[in-house]
Amino acid sequence: MIELIVSGLLLLIVGIVAGIVIRAIVVEKGFDKAQTQAKKIVDDAIKNAEQNKKQSLLETKQEIHNLRKDFDEEIKERKKEISNQENKLFQREKVLDNRAVNLDKRESNIDRKEESIEQKKRSLEDKNSKLDRLIEEQNEKLESIAGYTSDEAKELIFKRVESEMSQEIAQFIKEEEEKAKNEVDKKSKQLMASAMQKYAQDVTSEGTVSVVSLPNDDMKGRIIGREGRNIRTIEALTGVDLIIDDTPEAVVLSGFDPVRREIAKRSLEALVSDGRIHPGRIEEVVEKMREEVDRFIRDKGEEAVFEVGIGKIHPDLVKLLGRLHFRTSYGQNVLQHSIECAFLAGKLAAEIGEDEILARRAALLHDIGKAVDHEVEGSHVEIGENTAARYKEPKAVLDAIRSHHGEVEAETLIGVLVAASDALSAARPGARSESLDNYIKRLEQLESVSSKHEGVEQAYAIQAGREVRVLVKPDKVDDTLAHKLARDIKADIEKQLSYPGTIKVTVIRETRAQDVAK
């Protein structure tokens, strides 16, 4: 019995030991398997990290390459623009050198003429001294014969001559004016065309900056952007320089092309109003504003053609006319100036029996070259003539464009009329800027010169100084002397004053009789 118990215990102990050994073996195998799986997971993670690292490096290198390419293109465009500006400056310097040479030649000729005049002056002085001696001798003989002194004789003669000649001179002037009026119908066309052509003046351009107002100075930093990326994007897309200085709440846009400045101005105003300023948004806004300005330009051109009433015109010329809306000359809008010229030329053509529609067409297109003179080499006259010829405009239109500044002789009467209308539009009161002080001083001088003459009661400058009306005393100035007084005042104005255009002198003689009925 005891042996059986001992045998059972031994078997039990052996089973327990065998179970423990078997369990240890199983656990060890599971640990090895887990360790193998963990190692595999770590190896896969390391492999994926290496792949992600390589992909990030490739993307970074590609982005650096793209940025460098954009920067190189921007630098290339800037260099090209600078080169164009240098070429223009070289051409202008060449023109100035030629003018300097011509001025030196002219100065040399003037010196020679002055020397010749001085010699003639000395000769005349010698002759005058001899004449003075002869006159003194003759006066002494006359005084001894007549019994009058020279002063008494002069006074007597002058009074008699003045009394007789004043009436004769006034009558002669009146007769000559009547004679001229009788012949005016026969020579009206030639005289009008000649006078209009001589009246032409030059027109120049001005203004290369625009200003955009900001709500506050903090907006300047947002416009510049991080490391200047926003301002570089705006300048690259619009071709306009942004000047951000100490000026409070304002940014200055500088550029020679007024259309580019307008696109940049509208784009910057839209960005400031929206508040979202970054390269992507800038590209979107600039493209939108470019289309908007293009539509605005075409609408302006179509409005001008419709207002003037010249019929069909090539769409490209319509667009160029619209671009003139952004050009100014001495403060005068060039498109509005062209429209004014068209109406003036049309009226003049109708008065002298020429083609009114053709005259309007030529006057409307006479400054078309100014729409692209910042982009094409040459003067606006040459550019305008070539542009009009490319779109098959009539010969009279080409002649008007070529001759409207008087650099060449006009071949057609339409060309003369356009030159005259160009000068008249520029010279009308208020068309171009003039200093207020100079304007007031000129009117005061005009009235002062007119009031100094004997018999004048009052003088008024009207029509912005284009006319002076003189009221005379009827008991001292009769109808015939009024003509002579107008001529005398005209001569004094031409001699003493400096003024643009012409001044009309009107002398008014009025007699009033009054009584009271009781």
Image (cartoon, rainbow, N blue to C red):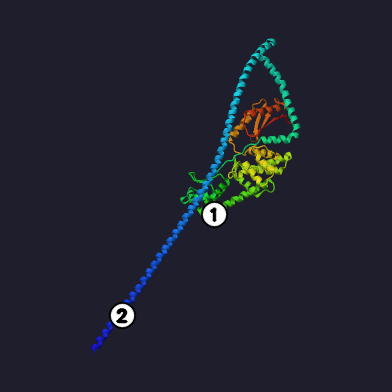
Q: Residue at x 64, y 29 (%)?
A: 494
Residue 305, horizontal then vertical, whole percent? 67, 47
Three-letter code for the amino acid on which mark 2 is drawn = Gly
The label on residue 136 is none
Location of mark 1 (residue): 284
Residue 150 in sight in this render: yes
Three-letter code for the amino acid on which mark 1 is drawn = Glu
- Is 244 on the left-hand or right-hand side of 154? left
- Is 105 on the left-hand or right-hand side of 219? right
Which mark is first along the chain, 1 or 2? 2
Q: Residue at x 69, y 35 (%)?
A: 194
Instruction: Count neighbours of disc 1 (C-alpha within 10 A) and say few if under 14, some if 14 to 19, many if 20 or more.
Output: few
Image position of 61 with respect to 37: above or below: above
Front residue of 329 and 441: 329
Which residue, as the protein is rendered here, is positioned at the far left?
2
Image position of 494 with respect to 144: above or below: below
Residue 388, horizontal then vertical, whole percent? 65, 45
Residue 326, horizontal then vertical, whole percent? 59, 45
Front residue of 106 and 127: 106
Q: Secondary structure at mark 2?
A: helix
Instruction: Count neighbours of disc 2 (C-alpha within 10 A) and say few if under 14, some if 14 to 19, many if 20 or more.
Output: few
Residue 518 in sight in this render: no
The quadrant of the image that shows the C terminus is top right
What is the distance, in whole Å, between disc 2 and disc 1 at their CAs? 79 Å
Figure quadrant of residue 11: bottom left
Residue 386, horizontal then vertical, whole percent? 64, 44
Q: Residue at x 62, y 28 (%)?
A: 496
Front residue of 190 and 509: 190
Location of mark 2 (residue): 19
